[in-house]
Image (tube, rainbow, N blue to C red):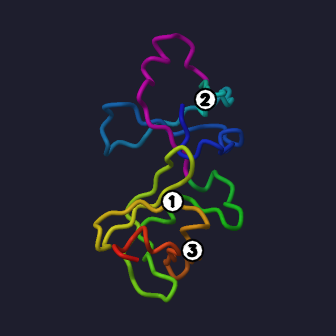
Amino acid sequence: MRLHHPESEALLELDALLVRRRGADPAAPPEELALADARPLPDAQWLVTFEGVVTRNDAEALRGAVLSTPRDRLAEPEPGEFFAEDLLDLDVLDPGGRPLGRVVRVYDNGAQAVVVVAGTELGEVDVPFVDEHVGEVDLERRTLVVRDLSLLVPGK
């Protein structure tokens, strides 16, 4: 299993995960499986075992499944940390408050989180979510300030 944020230890706090098997009806609710064990592996992946999944065939049936957990089961982020879903649809501003676009996607490139900003002169632009490039994030105002405008605007 690979986490969205490889350094997260959230699995250690959970007792179950929601499982959407490959090919499952997207309208159907995911099934909930109780965690028997979860431990990190050296390659930024996790070994997860579920109660009731005892044979190789049981485990193979989970290959390619998407695992998740309801947000209310997770600890609140520390100051300066954010859930990726909270960054979606934030208005992206320059340091002077001028609108530049909107966050349309968030992913982890293995080194850091990256927000994808759409609506710039360049189309969609990947902005590393690090202090060098991203300033204030205000979830109440639904804004994110980009410090390094050279990532977003040609000629800056």
- Residue that badge 2 annotates: 43
Given residues 6 and 13, the one toward you in this image is 6
Query: Mark 1 Cα within 10 Å, few/some/many (few <14, many 20+)?
Result: many
Residue for point 50% across, 74% down: 146
Tag 2: residue type?
Asp
Q: Position of residue 130 (x, y in %)?
A: 59, 62
The reply to whether discs 3 and 2 touch (Cβ–Cβ < 8 Å) is no
Q: Which residues are magenta?
A: 51-70
Magenta part, dominant SS: loop
Q: Is residue 35 depicted above or below 151 in this figure? A: above
Of the numbered discs 3 and 2, the one sitting upstream in the chain is: 2
Query: Mark 2 Cα within 10 Å, few/some/many (few <14, many 20+)?
Result: few
Q: Position of residue 2 (x, y in %)?
A: 54, 35
Give me the disc on residue 128. Answer: 1
Of the numbered discs 2 and 1, the one sitting upstream in the chain is: 2
Q: Is residue 94 depicted above or below 43 in this figure? A: below
- Residue that badge 3 annotates: 137
Residue for point 54% across, 68% down: 133
Disc 3 is placed on an element classified as: strand
Tag 1: residue type?
Pro
Tell me the quarter of the picture where residue 1 sits. top right
Determine whether, in the image, residue 39 is placed left or right of residue 142: right
Residue for point 55% across, 70% down: 134
The label nearer to you, 3 versus 1, is 1
Q: Is residue 58 magenta?
A: yes
